[in-house]
Image (spheres, helix red, strand yellow):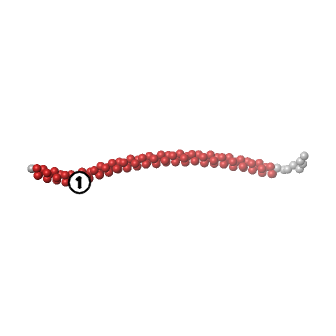
């Protein structure tokens, strides 16, 4: 009877050991997958934060560009006004007598 039980135990161990060994990597790989998923989630969060930061910077640069454009338009208008005044002075009849 002991021999039968020993054989039965050895047989069960012979079949159970590979199955148990196969489950260990599966559970550890599941842990690795979960860890990798967590890392991917963190990377996504970091990238989203970077995108928001870059969008903010682009918005600020666009604002500065619009302000600079407005300033250039004002300067162009001032130059055009001065040019018209200069042209009007050149076209005005010059007085013949100066005191």
The percent coordinates of residue 44 (x first, y second) are 43, 48
Q: Residue at x 55, y 48 (%)?
A: 58
Q: Which residue is drawn at 59% across and 46% down?
A: 63
Query: What is the number of callouts on the image?
Result: 1
The answer to whether 58 appears left or right of 81 in the picture is left
**14 left or right of 27?**
left
Viewer-nearest residue: 36 or 73: 36
Give the residue drawn at x 75%, y 50%: 83
Asked whether, in this view, residue 76 is left or right of residue 65, the answer is: right
- In the rendering, at what x and y percent does residue 80 appear? 72, 49
Residue 66 in the image, given as x and y percentages of width and height = 61, 47
Q: Name the residue under label 1.
A: 18
SS at badge 1 = helix
- Percent x, y for residue 75? 69, 48
For the residue pair 31 and 9, the one nearer the viewer reads as: 9
Report the residue at 63% width, 48% height from top.
69
Q: Residue furthest left?
A: 1
Q: In this view, does 58 lie to the left or right of 48?
A: right
Q: How dense is the environment of label 1, judged by Cα within 10 Å: few (below 14), some, or many (20 and up)? A: few
């Amino acid at each position: 009877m002991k021999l039968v039980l020993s054989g039965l135990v050895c047989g069960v161990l012979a079949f159970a050991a590979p199955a148990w060994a196969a489950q260990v990597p599966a559970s550890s790989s599941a842990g690795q997958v979960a860890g990798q998923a967590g890392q991917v989630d963190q990377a996504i969060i970091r990238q989203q934060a970077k995108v928001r930061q870059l969008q903010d910077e682009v918005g600020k640069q666009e604002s500065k560009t619009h302000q600079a454009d407005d300033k250039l338009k004002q300067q162009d208008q001032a130059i055009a006004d001065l040019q018209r005044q200069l042209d009007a002075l050149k076209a005005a009849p010059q007085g013949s007598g100066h005191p």
